[in-house]
């Protein structure tokens, strides 16, 4: 199963909104074939492994990280080929929470006389596809907030200079995160200040869908995001109710038309500021199953307050810059009591160069409404 997990990871960045799945076929204690879900729309791991096998597989054991599917989608059901090839036993990492599967695949195999053992490295298998499980169970994108700060909690000097807070090793790992997550979200102030591309530099074909919160549609037509909207899907969330004065309403309409002509997808939410929950719900409908949130501070604060952040990646550089006006990664009004602080659990730590990274899942008890410019 550990080998199957390693195989599954090879599909990272290519399978969304499908899960990453790995499969190993074993006969007489010897691996005779293996496979993984290589890309969305392609054969699933089990079918790849069984079709790749050059030996007789009847009576063999099959190890798979996720319950085999039992329905027709873009590909035939995996239970079908497992039964057809006369597999003797199937070892499953974790049961699929997708309503189309949800234990039905296991039942089909057992009804066909195949022994099925579940829960093999279950926690590891579920963690591998935390995005998939969250998306299928909640119909909302899994959101990972990423930021880099100094040891005294600053993301930039008071002057605004922020290049670079962290080491090259940390920045290289961020490119891995951009490959891992389907979308990347920033606020309009980040676009105006940094004019980013928000692409994946290590594997451009895995560049995330770019998302921008921009209530008043201030995004420049000559910005990198707009100029490359024809190459990488780009969505800008705005508020049609914002512009009420005739002159501003005309500018707003002209900007809308210009952005659409440039290939930008506009998402209008209700209210006078972008409704974050509504925006993310609409992106989930566009099959954006996960989002890397790259701030800034005000957007980070609003996403936290709304209860939309699922994971945090905090990169900490061994630097002290000070400054009363230097920005921190989470702005907003903050909480009034330490007891109300957002808590992380399932903590993991690692080092990238001289930097320290902490990641964990958000532990929440309730959600409140919030909007964001």
Image: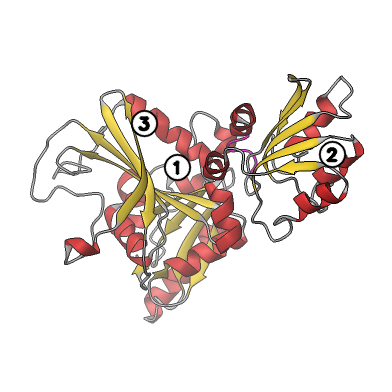
Q: Name the residue under label 3.
A: 171
CA separation, marks 3 and 2?
A: 43 Å
CA separation, marks 1 and 3?
A: 13 Å
Instruction: Please say if the residues under marks 3 and 2 sit with CB atoms less than 8 Å apart.
Output: no
Res 196 quadrant in image = top left
Q: Name the residue under label 1.
A: 198
Q: Which residue is drawn at 52% across and 37% down?
A: 179
Percent position (x, y) of residue 89?
A: 78, 36
Q: Which residue is drawn at 74% across and 20% down?
A: 29
Q: Earlier in the sequence, mark 1 or mark 3?
A: 3
Q: What secondary structure is the stretch in magenta mostly built from?
A: loop
Between tags 3 and 2, which lies in front? 2
Residue 215 bears which disc, if any? none
Taking depth in this image into account, of 333 and 44 the one nearest to the observer is 44
Taking depth in this image into account, of 182 and 4 the one nearest to the observer is 4
Q: Which of marks 3 and 2 is nearer the N terminus?
A: 2
For mark 3, give the secondary structure: helix
Specify the farthest residue to the right: 84
Answer above or below: position of 87 versus 279: above
Quarter occupied by the C terminus? bottom left
Answer above or below: position of 148 versus 342: above
Q: Residue at x 30, y 55 (%)?
A: 343
Q: Mark 2 points at which residue?
A: 82
312 is within the stretch colored magenta: no
For mark 1, give the secondary structure: loop
Is residue 187 at all visible to an observer of this figure?
no
Q: Residues within 10 Å of mark 3 (few under 14, many from 20)?
A: some
Identify the magenta region: 11-15
Between tags 1 and 2, which lies in front? 2
Percent position (x, y) of residue 225?
A: 47, 47
């Amino acid at each position: 199963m550990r080998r199957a997990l390693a195989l599954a990871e090879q599909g990272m960045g290519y399978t969304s909104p499908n899960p990453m799945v790995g499969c190993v076929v074993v006969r007489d204690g010897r691996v005779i074939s293996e496979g993984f879900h290589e890309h969305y729309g392609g054969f699933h791991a089990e079918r790849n492994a069984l079709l790749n096998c050059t030996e007789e597989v009847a009576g063999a054991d099959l190890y798979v990280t996720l319950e085999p599917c039992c329905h027709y989608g873009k590909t035939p059901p995996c239970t079908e080929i497992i039964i057809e090839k006369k597999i003797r036993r199937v070892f499953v990492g974790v049961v699929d929470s997708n309503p189309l599967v949800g234990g039905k695949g296991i039942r089909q195999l057992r009804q066909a006389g195949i022994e099925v053992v579940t829960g093999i490295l279950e926690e590891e298998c579920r963690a591998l596809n935390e995005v998939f499980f969250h998306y299928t169970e909640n119909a909302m994108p899994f959101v990972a907030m990423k930021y880099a700060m100094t040891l005294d909690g600053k993301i930039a000097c008071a002057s605004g200079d922020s290049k670079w807070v962290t080491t090259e090793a940390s920045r290289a790992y961020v490119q891995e995160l951009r490959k891992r997550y389907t979308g990347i979200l920033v606020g309009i102030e980040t676009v105006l200040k940094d004019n980013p591309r928000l692409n994946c530099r290590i594997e451009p074909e895995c560049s995330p869908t770019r998302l921008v919160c921009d209530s008043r549609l201030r995004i420049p037509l000559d910005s990198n995001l707009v100029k490359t909207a024809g190459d990488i899907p780009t969505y800008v969330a705005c508020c049609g109710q914002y512009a009420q004065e005739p002159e501003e309403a005309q500018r707003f309409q002209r900007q809308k038309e210009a952005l659409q002509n440039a290939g930008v997808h506009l998402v209008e939410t209700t209210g006078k500021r972008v409704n974050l929950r509504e925006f993310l719900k609409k992106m989930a409908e566009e099959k954006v199953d996960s989002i890397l949130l790259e701030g800034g501070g005000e957007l980070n604060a609003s996403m936290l307050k709304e209860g939309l952040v699922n994971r945090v990646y905090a990169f900490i550089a061994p630097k002290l810059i000070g400054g009363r006006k230097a920005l921190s990664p989470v702005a907003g009004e903050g909480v009034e009591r330490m007891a109300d602080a957002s808590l992380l659990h399932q903590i993991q730590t690692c080092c990238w160069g001289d930097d320290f990274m902490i990641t964990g899942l958000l532990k929440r008890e309730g959600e409140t409404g919030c909007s964001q410019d």
